[in-house]
Image (cartoon, rainbow, N blue to C red):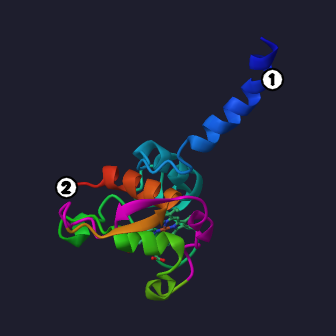
């Protein structure tokens, strides 16, 4: 049994090496809910329905009406570029902070248009944190 005991640590390493290096399962809304609570709720409200920055200037948007304002389609691309900071110029001011920190880590394949059928889905590697936020925000949309 000495042999087995000696080999066990190596067997464990070998198994770990065989496991997929990336878990590409799409994040659940709950993962995004946590990120939202930590990073967004202070301005956009606990339920995403808008709030205040405590300053003059544009109020934080009601994030439950993004689909409604976009013809019934959740504007994934806009949300992604807004949260990661790529879209800052379009926003006209800097009142909403950039969350470039969300750009690190593993990526998951997300259909950024959100409208394509499975065959022509425009899958783009998106940082997991941003994909999680999108998944969560989509659950908040009002009809
Ligand atoms: C410091 C306050 C603040 C924080 C924190 C904040 N936002 Fe915002 N956000 C704003 C303000 C103010 C606006 C509206 C004015 C603007 O677009 O800059 C806005 C606009 C947006 C928009 C655009 C909505 C539209 O209809 O154009 C999205 C999407 C958004 N925020 C998502 C997020 C997400 C996701 C987070 C968390 C990762 C977040 N925000 C954190 C203040 C904030």
Point out residue 56 in the picture as x, y percentages from the top left corner. 54, 77
Q: Label 2 neighbourhood size at 10 Å, few (<14), some (14-19), many (20+)?
A: few
Label 1: which secondary element? helix
Question: Along the line of sight, which residue is nearer the eye, 95 or 102?
Answer: 102
Write down the quadrant of residue 110 in the picture: bottom left
Vertical order, 124 against 11 (above or below): below
> Looking at the picture, how far across and down is residue 69, in whole percent?
24, 70
Is 136 placed above or below 54 here? above
Q: Which residues are magenta?
A: 94-119
Q: Nearer the viewer, residue 29 or 52?
A: 29
Q: Is residue 32 magenta?
A: no
| Residue 25: % across, % down | 42, 47
Side (left or right) of 115 relative to 97? left
Position of the N terminus by quadrant = top right
Residue at position x 59%, y 72% in the image = 97
Residue where numbered disc 2 is placed: 143
- In terms of depth relative to the viewer, which is nearer, 21 or 115? 21
- Residue 6, numbered circle: 1
Whether the magenta-drawn stretch holds residue 110 is answered as: yes
Total residue callouts: 2
């Amino acid at each position: 049994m000495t042999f087995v005991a000696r080999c066990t640590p190596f067997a464990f390493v070998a198994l770990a090496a065989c496991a997929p290096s990336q878990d590409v399962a799409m994040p659940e809304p709950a993962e995004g809910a946590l990120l939202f609570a930590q990073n967004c709720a202070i301005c956009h409200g606990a339920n995403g329905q808008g709030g205040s920055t405590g300053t003059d200037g544009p109020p934080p948007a009601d994030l439950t009406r993004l689909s409604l304002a976009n013809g019934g389609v959740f504007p994934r691309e806009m949300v992604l570029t807004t949260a990661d900071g790529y879209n800052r110029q379009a926003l006209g001011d800097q009142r909403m902070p950039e969350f470039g920190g969300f750009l690190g880590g593993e990526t998951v394949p997300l259909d950024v248009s959100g409208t394509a059928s499975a065959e022509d889905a425009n899958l783009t590697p998106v940082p997991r944190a941003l994909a999680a936020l999108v998944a969560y925000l989509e659950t908040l949309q009002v009809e």
